[in-house]
Image (tube, rainbow, N blue to C red):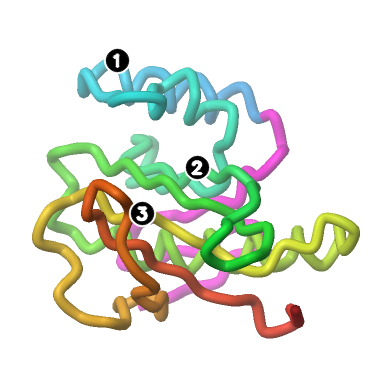
Amino acid sequence: MLETVSAQTEVVDGVEYRDVWQKNDKTVRRDAMALGARTGSGTGNFTPEAWAKGLCVVAYDRSELVAIAAGEIRFAQRMRANMAFLRVFVSPEHRKRGLVVPLTYKFHDVMRRYALTQPEIRIGGTMAIVTVKGHMDEPVTKADMVLIGYSPKGEPLIARWFDHFTL
């Protein structure tokens, strides 16, 4: 059940999804770093320090940070456009709760609004690389992202254009 609290916050099934894009919220940053330290997470260049810089949407269950969506805007050769790249981390004890879909929708909405306020950047949409094995057996995800191909490592690449964007 979706409850819109404000343009910044939505509640879905008791979990609060907050827009924190470029807000430099010290509490959220601290909570994100603590989540990383508590779970021993961070692989490759997606470490707690890196995700804290690009925090876009965070999910709280009561006062506990349980999931994050970090974003980075960069050119996607395959799309021939700047895209907002999504990276998601969900704490292990909350991974079966279905948090990724609402997190992805909220990320897309936040990045769409940002793209509209920054037209000179020309951000075309959102994009992600699916790194969790066995989670891409359909051409369209539950979050309306479409399979567009595979990375050199064989990982599915998914994307969703903004409605307002034209090439």
Residue at position x 59%, y 76% from top? Answer: 161
107 to the left or right of 6? left
87 to the left or right of 61? right
Q: Which residue is mark 1?
A: 37
What is the CA distance from the residue labelled 1 to the residue labelled 3?
24 Å
Q: Amino acid at mark 3?
A: Ile
Placement of 121 over or under 63, stated as above or below: below
Q: Earlier in the sequence, mark 3 or mark 2?
A: 2
In the rendered image, residue 23, in percent from the top left (x then y), is placed at 72, 37
Which one is nearer the viewer's eye here, 152 or 58?
A: 152
Q: What is the crowding at mark 2: few (fewer than 14 residues within 10 Å), some, or many (at least 20)? A: many
Q: Which range of residues does the magenta coloring cover?
A: 1-24
What is the CA distance from the residue labelled 2 to the residue labelled 1?
17 Å
In the rendered image, residue 53, in percent from the top left (x then y), is placed at 59, 27
The circle drawn on residue 129 is 3
In the rendered image, residue 145, in percent from the top left (x then y), is placed at 41, 75
Q: What is the crowding at mark 3: few (fewer than 14 residues within 10 Å), some, or many (at least 20)? A: some
Q: Which residue is mark 2?
A: 70
The C terminus: image quadrant: bottom right
Placement of 3 over or under 61, stated as above or below: below
